Amino acid sequence: MKKYQRNILVLYPLTVLIGSLIHTFSPLPDTVFSNKHNPLNQHFAKRGWAWTGFSLAIFIYFSSPAPRRLRAVYRWFLATLYWIVFAQWAFGHSVFDRVLMVSGTCSIDGHGHPRVCKANGGEWMGFDVSGHCFLLIHMSLFIYEELQILVPPPQPTAARRPTNVSNTFLPHPTTTAIMSSTLLFLLLLWYTMLIATSVYFHSWQEKVAGTVAGMAYWFLSYVIAWPTWFPEMMPRGYNQRAA
């Protein structure tokens, strides 16, 4: 595990933990972030995978050298599939919807599905895994790892770097610069929204479940499986980071 990955492994759970402690023991006054209908939540967080997936697709295409582009597409596809199964569809209801259905019941008799329950004026009482914790963390860690391609190769000597290295390292430097800046903005936005979610919404158990689910794909693939058994799957630049 690289140093930056160890930092990630501490940063995101610690953020959720501190936010959950504030939510439980010292609730903050309402702000724009405590309203789930605020523009950042409605237009960014709830459509987070569209923003992240589209931006990363462009970044991957233009920043990856042609021989490595297909592997980058595989990484994008697997991360997207993971999001779909847990939050959108898994041969029917998503994993999170199934957990909510199995663990809950409607305050109105005869309504056995959360959406039907709410549509009829009832309240569904069950274990509602924090989809925001899941999505915001999953997207952020995906961005973190794919940006590793920007880590420069080691200098062959202490002398000045050859002028043609940047062109070989980044096939389309201008587009890469624009899209990497976009991804860094999204990374900051997703972290801000994660703080808001941790401070204002869900029980700590539901946030822990969402955090574990959000980090699981990253940990199993980018930290364990790919560096150990399939190093060619890792983004170019990973091996340049400090251990």
Image (cartoon, grey):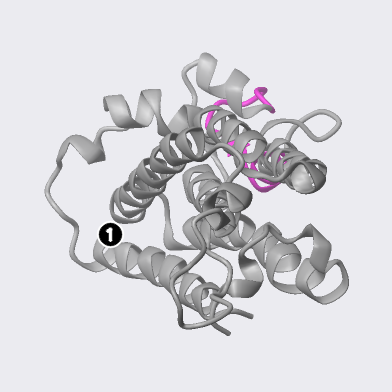
x and y percent of residue 13 in the render? 46, 69
206 is within the stretch colored magenta: no
Q: Which percent across, then down, holds residue 65?
A: 71, 45
Q: Residue at x 46, y 18 (%)?
A: 121
- 191 above or below 30? below
In terms of secondary structure, where does tag 1 sit? helix
Question: How many discs appear?
Answer: 1
Q: Residue at x 51, y 22 (%)?
A: 118
The foreground one among 12 and 23 is 12
Lateral position of residue 100 relative to residue 175, left or right: right
Is 109 situated left or right of 102 in this image?
left
The residue at the point 69 percent across, 28 percent down is: 112
**10 Å crowding of disc 1: few (<14), some (14-19), many (20+):** some
Q: In what quadrant of the picture does the N terminus appear? A: bottom right
> Which quadrant is home to the C terminus?
bottom right
The residue wearing badge 1 is 23
The residue sitting at the top extreme is: 120
Span colored in magenta: 98-112
Q: Position of residue 186 (x, y in %)?
A: 40, 41
Q: Using the image, determine if residue 105 lies above or below residue 17.
A: above
Taking the magenta stretch, the answer to whether it contains residue 107 is yes
| Front residue of 233 and 139 | 233
Is 82 displayed left or right of 127 in the figure?
Answer: right
In the image as oriented, which residue stretches furthest toward the left? 29
Left or right of 1 on screen, residue 70? right
- Across and down, in percent, residue 230 comes to 86, 66
Q: Residue at x 43, y 71 (%)?
A: 160
Q: Is residue 239 visible?
A: yes
Any part of residue 123 in sight = no
What's the residue type where badge 1 is placed? Answer: His
Nearer to the camera, 176 or 210: 176
